[in-house]
Amino acid sequence: MLLELEGVTAAYGRVQVLDGVSLAVPEGGAVGVLGANGAGKTTTLRAITGVVRAGGTIRFDGRSILGMRPDQVAALGIAHVPEGRGTLGDLDVRENLRVGAYLRKDRARIREDMDYCLELFPQLRDRIRSNASALSGGEQQMLAVARAFMAKPRLLLLDEASLGLAPGTAKTVYGAIRRLREESGISMLVVEQNANLAFSLVEEAVVLETGRSVLSGPTEELRTMDDIRRAYLGG
Ligand code: ATP
C-alpha cells in the first residue's frame, strides 16, 4: 500500500473529530472518501498532510509520517488540493504552476509538465497571464489541480474539487483529473460530496460517519447499497 491509515484520531482543541479512521490507497489506485457534512473528510486529509495533529497510524510508502510537518510530508511526494483551492491570487497562472514545482530542479521536465498542464486544461492556456484571483471558479480549480501536479507527487489529495462549480464545469474538471490519473499513474485520495463524480474517478471508497470509517469497498458494491444511495447519491 502506498498510503495506510489505521485507527486515526484527531481533535480540534477538546473536540474529538476523528475517532478511528482507517483506509488504504494502493500504488496507482484512487480511493474516495464519502460522508455527510462534518463527518471528518477534510480533517482526514489535514491529518495526512500534518496540518492537524493526529494519533493512530499513518504510513506512506511503508514509513510512518505521523508527526511530520506539512513541508516534510510534501517533500515525500504528497500534494494536497485543499477545499477552497488555495491558489495564489496575486500570482498569474504560470507563476502558480512554477510555485507548484518549487521543490524540483529538473528544469526541462518542469517545462514539459507545464506544457502538459496547459494541454490538459486549455482554459488555463488562454488565461496564462491572468492573476489567479481573476479566474472563474472552474479555472481556479483547474489551476489548483495543475499546480499540485507540478510538484510531481506520488499521491494527490483532492478535497471537494466540485465545490461551488456548475455541474458542467465540475464534470469537465473531473474528466481532466481522470485523464491525468490515467496518463500519469498518480495515486489519489478523493474527498467529494458528489458521489457520482467521485465514482467516475475512483474504484474504491470509504464512508466516514462522525469521524469513523464505517464502510469501505469497491465502488461497484457501494453503489448498489440502499443506504449509501439514500445518503450520498440522492435516492
Ligand atoms: P465538510 O464537507 O463540511 O467539509 P468534512 O467531512 O470535511 O465536512 P471536517 O471539515 O473534517 O468535515 O469537520 C469535521 C468536524 O470538525 C466538524 O464538526 C467541524 O465543525 C469541525 N471542525 C472543522 N474544522 C474545525 C476547526 N478549525 N476548529 C474546530 N472545529 C472544526
Image (cartoon, rainbow, N blue to C red):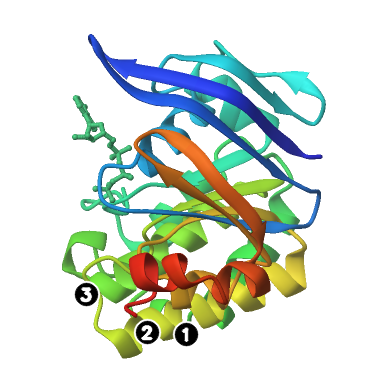
Residue 230 image-quadrant placement: bottom left
Q: Where is residue 14 in the image (x, y as percent from the top left)?
A: 23, 9
In the rendered structure, the answer to whether residue 69 lies left or right of residue 25 reads left
In the displayed structure, 105 sits above or below 73; it is: below
Residue 123, horizontal then vertical, whole percent: 39, 83
At a point 58% along the width and 67% down the height, the residue shown is 222
Relative horizontal placement of residue 49, taking residue 111 as reference (left or right): left
Task: Look at the numbered disc 3 and give the secondary structure of its residue.
Answer: loop
Residue type marked 1: Pro
| Residue in the foreground of this view, choosing between 40 and 148 | 40
Most distant residue in the bottom direction: 168
The image quadrant where one finds ligand 1 is top left
Sequence-wise, the earlier of marks 2 and 3 is: 2
Could you tell me residue 113's position as x and y percent? 66, 64
Q: Residue 122 carries which label?
A: 1
Residue 224 appears in which quarter of the rendering? bottom right
Crowd band around label 3 with a 10 angstrom C-alpha radius: few (<14), some (14–19), many (20+): few
User: Badge 2 is on which residue?
Assistant: 126
What's under tag 3, amino acid-wise?
A: Ser
Question: Marks 2 and 1, how far apart in space?
Answer: 7 Å
Q: Find out whether the residues at labels 2 and 3 contact each other: C-beta distance under 8 Å.
A: no
Alpha carbon separation for disc pair 3 and 1: 14 Å
Task: Name the quarter where the N terminus is drawn.
Answer: top right
Q: Are marks 2 and 1 in contact (CB under 8 Å)?
A: yes
Quadrant location, the C terminus: bottom left
**94 in relation to 107, above or below:** below
Task: Give amino acid for label 2.
Answer: Asp
Above or below, 31 relative to 52: below
Residue drawn 41% across and 58% down?
A: 144
**Of the residues under marks 3 and 1, which one precedes in the sequence?**
1
Q: Name the residue under label 3.
A: 136
Measured in 3D between alpha carbons, the distance from the residue under mark 2 to the one under mark 3, in whole angstroms, is 13 Å
